[in-house]
Image: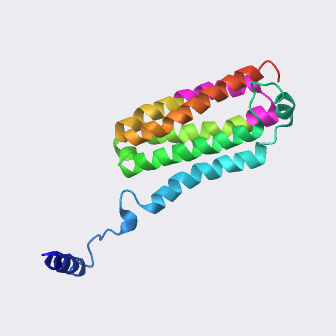
Amino acid sequence: MASQNCQRRFKDMTNQEPGKDNKTSSDSPRSPWKLAVSVAMPLFITMTMVLLFGSGKKYRVLATIFWLPPLWFIHLASLGSSFLMGLAAWLVWSDGGFDSESHALPLYVAQISLSMVWNPLVLVIGVAWLGFVFCVIQFGTLFACYFYFKRVSPSAEYLIRPCLTWVAYLTFVTCQLIAYL
């Protein structure tokens, strides 16, 4: 019986028409290249922002205050949040969520764009009040992503929760920096 199934599968594979759209494993919904793109792009963007704008000299002076996290922790948590958001986006993408939920992709792009703004705005320029405004907007955008992503993939919902926690904490830190910068 098993040999008959194997022969039938082989016959089906060899008798495909050349003009037909023959899907390969890279076209499958959960393909590795989609995972690589979904995770690598936000990580690359975040790493670029950290390397270009991450050496906040003003912040390092203030980091002696005990409730402000060290700069390396902010960068590491930002990279972790980007990784989790990329993974959540991959789950939504592979389940067809960017097609069915029309607001999911623009919200995800907006969230990634807003996450790029905090480093140069607060650490280099030193405009904490504007950084606070961007953090609040980013939190709202991330919450909207959470709402739309959980409709498509319940696993993506659990990946976004730590990102929401991180942005809420970053908003708190930025609010505390308003008094010092």
Q: Is residue 136 magenta?
A: yes
Name the spot of residue 17 as percent of width and height, x first: 23, 78
Quadrant of the rendered image containing residue 61: top right
Is 100 or 142 nearer to us in this picture?
142
Q: In the picture shown, does residue 41 fall above or below 134? A: below
Q: Is residue 177 magenta?
A: no
Q: In the picture shown, does residue 107 fall above or below 137? A: below
Quadrant position of the C terminus in the picture: top right
Name the spot of residue 159 as percent of width and height, x first: 48, 40
Name the spot of residue 128 as percent of width and height, x first: 75, 25
Residue 147 visible in rendering: yes
**Residue farthest top in this picture:** 179
Residue 101 visible in rendering: no
Colouring style: rainbow
Quadrant position of the N terminus in the picture: bottom left
In terms of secondary structure, what is the magenta stretch mainly?
helix
How many numbered tags mark residues here? Answer: 0
Q: In the picture shown, does residue 67 fall above or below 166? A: above
The residue under the point 73% across, 22% down is: 129
Name the spot of residue 23 as percent of width and height, x first: 32, 68
The residue under the point 81% across, 42% down is: 55
Instruction: Write the start and end of the magenta stretch as one range.
Output: 120-140
Q: With 91 as the anchor, is 64 left or right in this view?
A: right
Q: With 62 as the anchor, is 149 left or right in this view?
A: left
Q: In the picture shown, does residue 105 fall above or below 173? A: below
The residue under the point 41% across, 35% down is: 148
The residue under the point 17% across, 79% down is: 3
